[in-house]
C-alpha cells in the first residue's frame, strides 16, 4: 500500500512544472529632456532558469510630460515597447498631436495580462499601484515576445523624452520574470 502511494505521488509529481519568480530592480535617473538618445540601464540575470513564462516591468516616474516618453525593454535581440508617447494619435484634437500633458507614472506595472485597465496608451492619469498593458498603439511586440526564451543574460530598459519642455525623473524600475526552472537530474 505504501509503495502504491509513493508511486502515485511520484507519477503526479512528474506531471507538474515548477515556476520561479525573479525580480531585478535598478537605480533611478533623469531622462534627458527632448533627447532621443535617452537613458538606459541594465539588469543581468544569472539564475538557473530555463524558460520564460511571463515578464512584467514596474516603473516609478515623476515630472515631465507623459506624452513625451518612449520606453522599451530589450533582451536577446527582442524589443518590447513599454511606453510610446501615451495619448499621441488617439483623436484629431490638438492635444493628441503631442500626447498627454499629465506628469509622472507613479508606480505602475506593465503586464500583458492586465486587461482590467487596458493599454497604458489611452490612460491620461495612471493610478499608482495599478497594472496596465504595455503601449503597443503604434505596433510592435508585447512582453509576451520574451516567452520561452532563456532569461539568463543582460536585459536593457531604455527611456527617451521625445519633446522638450519638462524633465522626467525615473525614480526606479523593476523587472519581474516568471520562469520554469532548469530540469534537475
Image (cartoon, helix red, strand yellow):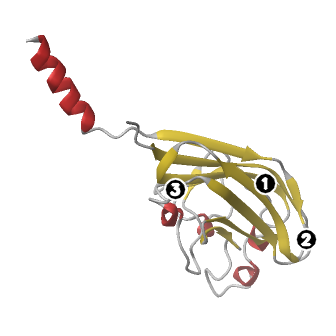
Q: Which of the two marks, 1 or 3, is nearer to us in this view?
A: 3
Distance, label 2 to label 3, CA atoms, is 35 Å
Residue hosting label 3: 150
**Residue at far top of view:** 2
- N-terminal of the pair, mark 1 or mark 3, is 1
| Quadrant position of residue 184 | top left
Residue 119's spot in the image, x, y percent? 55, 65
Mark 3 packing: few (<14 Cα in 10 Å), some, or many (20+)? some
Mark 1 touches mark 3? (CB < 8 Å): no
- N-terminal of the pair, mark 2 or mark 3, is 2
Q: Answer above or below: position of 95 versus 144.
A: below
Residue nearest the viewer, comparing 131 with 174: 174
Mark 2 touches mark 3? (CB < 8 Å): no
- N-terminal of the pair, mark 2 or mark 1, is 2
Residue 7's spot in the image, x, y percent? 15, 24
Mark 2 packing: few (<14 Cα in 10 Å), some, or many (20+)? many
Residue hosting label 1: 61
Residue drawn 60% across and 66% down? 76
Residue hosting label 2: 33
Residue nearest the viewer, comparing 32 with 123: 32
Distance, label 1 to label 3, CA atoms, is 29 Å
- Secondary structure under badge 1? strand
Residue 32's spot in the image, x, y percent? 90, 68
Q: Which of the two marks, 2 or 3, is nearer to us in this view?
A: 3
Distance, label 2 to label 1, CA atoms, is 14 Å
Mark 2 touches mark 1? (CB < 8 Å): no
- What number is the disc on residue 115? none
Horizontal relation, residue 141 to residue 60: left or right: left
Residue drawn 87% across and 55% down? 29
Q: Quadrant of the C terminus?
A: top left
Q: Answer above or below: position of 159 versus 16.
A: below
| Quadrant position of residue 30 | bottom right
Amino acid at each position: 500500500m505504501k509503495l502504491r502511494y509513493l508511486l502515485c505521488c511520484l507519477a503526479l509529481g512528474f506531471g507538474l512544472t515548477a515556476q520561479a519568480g525573479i525580480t531585478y530592480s535598478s537605480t533611478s535617473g533623469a531622462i534627458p529632456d527632448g533627447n532621443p538618445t535617452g537613458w538606459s540601464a541594465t539588469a543581468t540575470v544569472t539564475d538557473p532558469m530555463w524558460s520564460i513564462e511571463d515578464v512584467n516591468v514596474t516603473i516609478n516616474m515623476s515630472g515631465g510630460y507623459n506624452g513625451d516618453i518612449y520606453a522599451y525593454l530589450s533582451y536577446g535581440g527582442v524589443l518590447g515597447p513599454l511606453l510610446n508617447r501615451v495619448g499621441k494619435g488617439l483623436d484629431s484634437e490638438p492635444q493628441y498631436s503631442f500626447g498627454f500633458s499629465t506628469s509622472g507614472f507613479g508606480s505602475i506595472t506593465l503586464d500583458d495580462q492586465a486587461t482590467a485597465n487596458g493599454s497604458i496608451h489611452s490612460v491620461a492619469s495612471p493610478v499608482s499601484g495599478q497594472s496596465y498593458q504595455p503601449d503597443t498603439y503604434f505596433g510592435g511586440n508585447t512582453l509576451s515576445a520574451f516567452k520561452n526564451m532563456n532569461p539568463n543574460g543582460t536585459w536593457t530598459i531604455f527611456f527617451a523624452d521625445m519633446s522638450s519642455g519638462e524633465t522626467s525623473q525615473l525614480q526606479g524600475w523593476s523587472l519581474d520574470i516568471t520562469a520554469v526552472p532548469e530540469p534537475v537530474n
